[in-house]
Amino acid sequence: MYKIREAKQLTDNIYLMNVEAPRVAKHCEPGQFIIVKIDEEGERIPLTICDYDREEGTVTIVFQVIGASTLQMAGLKAGDAFADFVGPLGRPSELIEEDPEELKKKKILFVAGGVGTAPVYPQVKWLSEHGVKADAIVGAKNKDLVILEEEMEKVSNLYVTTDDGSYKRKGMVTDVIKDLMENQKKEYDLVVAIGPMIMMKFVCLLTKELGIHTIVSMNPIMVDGTGMCGACRLTVGDEVKFACVDGPEFDGHLVNFDEAMKRQQLYKTEEGRAYLKEKEGDTHHGGCGHCGGEK
């Protein structure tokens, strides 16, 4: 069992947990993910690592409630435990394989959308610890959905934007990229974008025009995490890849986002049905003809 040392709610539906997992903490690197199971009968849930402490033997995860299993996870408290906490899985960020001295010569921009701030944070933190202070854009729908702002401010040059203008800037993350480059005359050698699929798609369309190499994380379409289910199959250039074993990070300019988003939609209806059944319990009888609750 893997004890939860800390559990807290960051927003209405985003939660942070610090979990005792010494073996994972000892070997994990930024960009990798883990798989959790609440109990023996539970669903396997892949989550990108948000932070880790090798000395304490802990790993921090951040997740958003989108289905029945994550709803159950949200109910766990400090002192509770996961049945399984497997990892690290996937390939680490390509940044940690580069010479720190060479990285210092690069101008790097991170773009995070919503809960995507969680997997961006360990990469930015790792760079900061190696003498590289990157620029970072964090975008959210509104002020209440901005997460890890204080943590990000300590390790990056942070720019926060909200869709509705309720906090800091108003606009999309792509608007901030344009402002930084056109008005503030900044130049970048690399962009790392992690967040909703549609956000990563439009960041890549912009950076392709600007000629900036861009890395994205395809964690949003992962299900099993081991390559067995095929749910995270995607096309990268002229090759078929699996996000969980070949990624989760890929060259964003080669990813077929339209195909990936169609695959992602296939699972949303089932997730929604399971979520309602878990949320409403015995009061959920279906009857709408769409959710399958009447069967």
Image: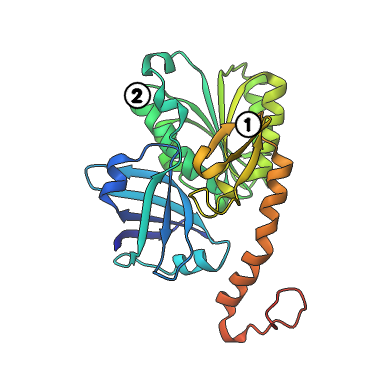
Looking at the image, residue 134 lies above or below residue 169? above
Query: What residue sits 68% from the left and 30% below the top?
Result: 238
Q: Where is residue 91 in the image (x, y as percent from the top left)?
A: 45, 36
Q: Where is residue 43 in the image (x, y as percent from the top left)?
A: 48, 64
The image quadrant where one finds the C terminus is: bottom right
Report the mark closest to the observer, 2 or 1. 1
Which one is nearer the viewer's eye here, 91 or 111? Answer: 91
Q: Position of residue 79 (x, y in %)?
A: 29, 66
Q: Residue 130 carries which label?
A: 2
Q: Mark 1 falls on what kind of element?
A: loop
Q: Mark 2 falls on what kind of element?
A: loop
- The chosen color scheme is rainbow
Q: Which mark is residue 252?
A: 1
**Residue that lies at the very extreme toward the front in this rendered image:** 228
Looking at the image, residue 105 lies above or below residue 113? above
Work out whether residue 1 can be spotted.
Answer: yes
Query: What residue sits 45% from the left and 65% below the top?
Result: 73
Q: Characterize the local packing of mark 1: few (<14), some (14-19) or many (20 or more) Cα atoms within 10 angstroms.
A: many
Query: What residue sits 51% from the left and 23% below the top?
Result: 108
